[in-house]
Image (cartoon, helix red, strand yellow):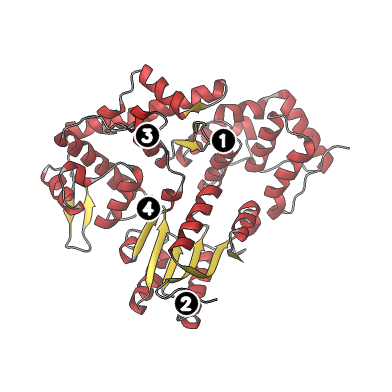
Amino acid sequence: MAFPQNTPHMAIFWDVENVADESATHRTMTERIRQAGAITRAYAFADWDARRRMAEELYALGYDLIHIPDERDNASDYKMAAYILDHLVHYPETTRYVLITGDGDFKLIAGALREHGVELWLISNPIITASELPELATIYSDILSFRPALDCVRPEDCDESVQSIVQLRHLAAVQLQEVIRVITKTSNMPGVGHAKHVMRSLNPDFDEATMGFGHWNDFLDWAEAQNYIIREGEMPRTILSLPDKISPQSVKISQEVNEAFAFMTQVVEERFNEGPPFTLMELGIELRERGLETNKIGYRRFSDFVLSAEKRGLIRIIAPVKDGDSPIVLPAYTVDRMQDWFEEKVDLLFGPSVNVPKPAFLKKIGLMLLDTQTTLDELENYLTAPRVKEVYTEILAASEIPFLPPFQQSLAHILIGKGLECNTIVEKVNEELSPLGIKLQCPA
């Protein structure tokens, strides 16, 4: 195929085990990459037995699926690195490599690509990305930036509140302190460039220019002068850290922001436990009526506040099915929240022989709750409801299976509780059981 002159020839290498979101995000991301040049090869690496539905979606988008059944740590990384190096040798016409990963194991590969003179477009979740990786990229994108944009649901939601530059600066500095904590929690070092990517990811409305700074480093100069942060080491290896003593003003602002997010997530979850979820418009009205003023904690628009909450994994905004409808807002569950819930409930709901699932499975259960639009309270009710338990026991008996692991057990109870037909329940649960060699069947 002949491509226009000067069109970048691109190859995509996607570490699915490390970076993934929902189907709409994947479609938008792939389309944006296609618009930027000519894709000569597109590979996606994962254990596809555990991701049957996603495998079908990515195959339809044009990816070659490279199956990695090996359970050893970094098995996908090694295979993907081998493919990249092989491509570098055999396809010299490729001028831009698109790496979808945040894994620090790819630092050497990224450096090699840079030395070879080709462009590197890195796509990842900046919060869990190795600090040095974005610095090696020619282009960097936050995968969550490919989610559908959040339009204003009412004209006033687009209006920015009037705040002084001084107030904006102090609020942004407290947000920067949170960024440093978040990066450090992932065992990464908060480099200057990495911190900027995470800052923009967690706070989509952040713009140093609105605060009178010409550049990101000018903002860092001010934040350090005000004792919000400390910079250690010479560029480009400068690391950001927090002072030993945090000012009372910083503590107060940080507490107010965290309380606002916690209040909003509580309101969203309470509503969904009672009935249909809030639309975005209804949520904004509800929060205002209950006294939450987001402009006082640094968010000039309500939509900025909601997007920031979503980036922190506290809620999920679901695009409307029909044009003209408002998006709905669902509760989302972080791994920490799922960990606390399982530690409290595991004996009661799953039995004393069941351990708390590992973080990867806790994340998967949280995504399942979103996918099925189920709250934790509903999950507990489904797991204890006599009618649901009776149907579940009948399916196990018909299948001659004594029990299911927590994830599949939870999914089965949710589907039963929501009133789905047995054949549909068994089909959906069997998709998740196939890697285990277990298969359910309906009672005769």
Instruction: Give the Cα distance between marks 3 and 2.
Output: 43 Å
Q: Position of residue 124 (x, y in %)?
A: 42, 56
Instruction: Give the Cα distance between marks 1 and 4.
Output: 32 Å
Q: Position of residue 36 (x, y in %)?
A: 43, 63
- Find disc 3 in the rendering and name its residue: 303
Q: Are marks 3 and 2 in contact (CB under 8 Å)?
A: no
Comparing 265 with 90, the one in front is 90
Q: Position of residue 193 (x, y in %)?
A: 27, 57
Instruction: Give the Cα distance between marks 3 and 1.
Output: 20 Å
- Find disc 2 in the rendering and name its residue: 85
What kind of element bears circle 4? Answer: helix
What kind of element bears circle 2? Answer: helix
Q: Is residue 178 left or right of residue 232?
A: right
What kind of element bears circle 1? Answer: loop
Q: Is residue 139 left or right of residue 79?
A: left
Q: Is residue 187 above or below residue 82?
A: above
What kind of element bears circle 3? Answer: helix
Q: Is residue 160 left or right of residue 265?
A: left
Q: Are marks 3 and 4 in contact (CB under 8 Å)?
A: no
Mark seen at residue 126: 4
Instruction: Give the Cα distance between marks 4 and 2.
Output: 25 Å
Mark seen at residue 322: 1
Q: Looking at the image, can residue 18 be seen?
A: no
Name the front one of labels 1 and 4.
1
Which is more N-terminal, label 2 or label 3?
2
Quarter of the image with the C terminus is top right
Instruction: Give the Cα distance between marks 3 and 4.
Output: 21 Å
Give the amino acid at mark 4.
Pro
